[in-house]
Amino acid sequence: MDRNFTINVDGRDHTIRVDPRMPLLYALRNELGKKGPKFGCGLAQCGACTVILDGVAIRSCVMPVAAVKGKVRTLDGLSKNGKTHPVQQAFIDEEAGQCEYCISGWIMTATAFLEKDPNRSDEEIRAALAGLKCRCGTHMSILRAIRRAADEMAS
Amino acid sequence: MNQPTIARRDLLKGAAALVVAVTVPPISLLTTARAKTIHVARTLNPAQLDTWLAIAADGTITGYWGKMDMGQGVDTAIAQIIAEELDVDVDNVNIIAADSALCADQGGASGSTGVSRSGAAFRAAAAEARLVLCEKASAEFAVPMDKLEVADGVVRVTGDASRSVSYAELVADRMFDSPIAWNGEYGNSLALTSRAKSKDPKDYTVVGTSVRRKDIAGKILATTEFLHDVRVPGMLHGRMVRPSVAGASVVSVDRTSISGISNVQVIVENDFVGVVATKEWDAIQAAKKLEVKWDESDVGFPTTSDELFDWIRAATPGKSEIDEDIGDVDAAIAGSAKTITAEFEWPFQSHARMAGAASVADVRNGEAIVWTDSQKPYDTGKGAKKLLETPIGNRRRGGAKYTVRSIWKPGPGSYGRSDAGDGAMDAVLLSEAVGAPVRVQWMRHEGHAWDPKGPASVITCRAGLDDAGEVIGYHFHVKGFSRADMNSRENDPSEVLAGHLVGHASTPAWRMQTPAESYRFDNKRYSWDALPPLRKQASPLRTAHFRDPYGPEVHFASESFIDELAYASGEDPLAFRLARVTDERDAAVLEAAAELARWEPHTGPRKRRDADGTMIGQGIAYAQRNGSVNAVVGEVEVNPETGRIWVRRMYVGADHGLIVNPFTLDRTIEGNLLQSTSRTLFEEVKFDRYMVTTDDWLSYPILDVADAPLEIKIKQINRPELEPRGAGEPTTRVVPAAIANAFFDATGIRLRRVPFTPERVLAALQAH
């Protein structure tokens, strides 16, 4: 049965009334109107729904709302106070991705990874991104963007 | 949301008398350019300039484009072409894409024609608009046309700085009210002709430069409205319930099985079963829990993926054709000193979009609005209309007429006739049934198992060589499933899954493909056998166009076999090709790719090894496609322990005619290369006698970031004397053979069955 939950997303508390088993993704999209996290598989296999929960990139399509404890960041809220987040800026500058449907997976995973420590080798970056899907085959531009963002954040 | 509330009736009547200002909310612009849309009413008529371009009071230009873009920068290229001909800043040009009420039908995305065909139309429209504007200025200043010059949207009298007028002042917010010559056709072949001469390419300042994609920032910053974000008042959520196995039909539906879920409706029409709920999560649960009894007495397929290629070899073709027949191949091969034969196998492949199909449809009172990410949104509208109007079975709707508007919105990348059109028709039927707007989202298993498939084939190549090693006869023969069980467009109920499920008979067509190249052989035959579908009606294995329809399949075989012929002739694979291509553009791309790769001539596999035993090889392949031509050198490493192939470097010689935007062209080529690498190394639809069994990313793996190359280098060859040619597909077809040929150079072994999985590679290595 539906219950009230208060979740903190992109710096704001939101109280929603939903089925506790419902994955966070549907709350973000339907209750909060977020556009960044996308439904891709509902199976935690592709990453299109990725958000950051207390610094950790998670797949919101399998995380029940009732299990969400902490602060959630979405692609929508990554840039704050009129300043574009360096990872997003790098993706724009490199024109990384193509259809961009999968892009939350790459940007949110890279952001969580680089915010911990931006001094990362190319091999470490590839390892951190393992499992994410991009059907358009734009991995080269995505890797260039993340390299660029890492260098920018480390400087 | 700052958009005005729009009466539904106003939304729909766009095509008749349109007020753009209220029908296009700002959020749909898909652009971060500072331009705003124009606010004029006009009727869509391709023979009127106003249909194509409008100029606002602030000087911004809007182009109404009857195609769509999915991140390859095609809309940006169109904006560049408009800016070039009109002499305005490209940032001041907006593109509105593929809304049947706002933009004339230019065919949607199709055959890599976005820039080549629709770009030519907009070049003519913009040149005409410039002429009309200059004529107005000429009249205003009472000076002849040749005394006028244009810069940055301002017309000036040459040599008189005091006399100038902006485009905006000349026409702002009013109609051009001026005709333009139209060839009377819609779709890809729609063409316009201006009275004015277009610019000489040597004077281009915008076309040919790397203007940044207009759509990128909105999508990265999550401000762009994707199809998936469309929400309309009163919208409900739909999910489909698919047949238990291929061909199963409904016996009964137990609605009590979902009685615990509130506000759910069950829609059953023949074998079309769906649920509609107020909340999306409830619709998902209901679709999962709904108990349907299926009749499985006439189901499944006559073969399985394990036995598929033998089945193809033995199957009786539905249609056979010879595409090209030069000399007497049979006599030449019969009289040759040496004969070479090889067979190549390609499996069914899934479009497997990042998300399965989605759509929002609002079907009420003889009116339908369909939001879709289909590549062919105009055909989505036409197909919806036919589906709604055509009586079938016990349908009540005979005689009803619908007014339909289809609105394109961006979605997950689609590379051919994917499931997009099928999903739209699901939404249409569900919305019609419940009398409210319905949003449909296919779940992952539907996107993999129920989407249209790229066709499977067996290709046989045989050739005869004379005593000197010269190839004197070459026969290429593809036997496989037609690439068009489903049409490339969802314009008819017979061409969509929902149509099949409610009872419309499938109408498969015979469409095949043979190689496109310029090799000179004295005796040469290209022929094909097309097979009927394994299951005709509502089949999860129904075939349809998948990026570069049959291109990767046939060129995998032909360019692998050309490599075999080169070695058999004792020649270097590059030199062999260069000696036989008859088009200088073909030679140029081959040489460009080889130069980037530092190609070293060799007449046999080199079997090079890294210090750790990794096997290293290089391979080349080339192909033409509709006026484009590409060559690629792939450099692979093969791990002899794991069987993993890694394509670590790729070098491309690319000629797509006139280059409009080098930056986005590079990225479009990269996407072709990696997607095709994925299909070559990993992708195979598997099925048993009943159903497709690869229904998620675990069972249908695609390329991972670990498999991305270290480096891709591309040499773009600009051909200003030519029209811009398509780039959306042509580099896809050269990849599989380049990888196979590189593998041969590394190992001395031919891989002739796609995908080249580690298991198959290990088996091949152990067999030698």
Image (spheres, coloured by chain):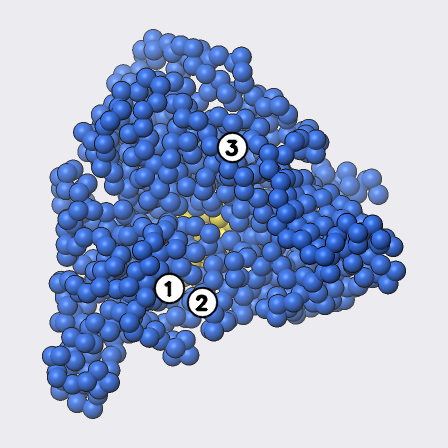
Chain to which the residue tagged by mark 1 belongs: B
Assign a secondary structure to mark 1: helix
Label 2's element?
A: loop
Query: How far apart, in angstroms, are the residues tagged by discs 1 and 3?
Result: 35 Å
How many other residues sit within 10 Å of disc 3, few (<14), some (14-19) or many (≥20)? many
Colour seen for chain B: blue
Residue sitting at x 35%, y 56%: B190
| Amino acid marked by disc 1 | Ala
Q: Which mark is residue B120?
A: 1
Q: Is residue B37 above or below residue B687?
A: below
Residue at image position (13%, 87%) is B162
CA–CA distance between discs 2 and 1?
A: 8 Å
Are the residues flagged by discs 3 and 2 in contact, CB closer than 8 Å? no
The residue lying at 23 percent from left, 57 percent from top is: B51
Residue under pointer 2: B723
Q: Determine if residue B563 is in view.
A: no
Q: In front: B320, or A124?
A: B320
Residue where numbered disc 3 is placed:
B542
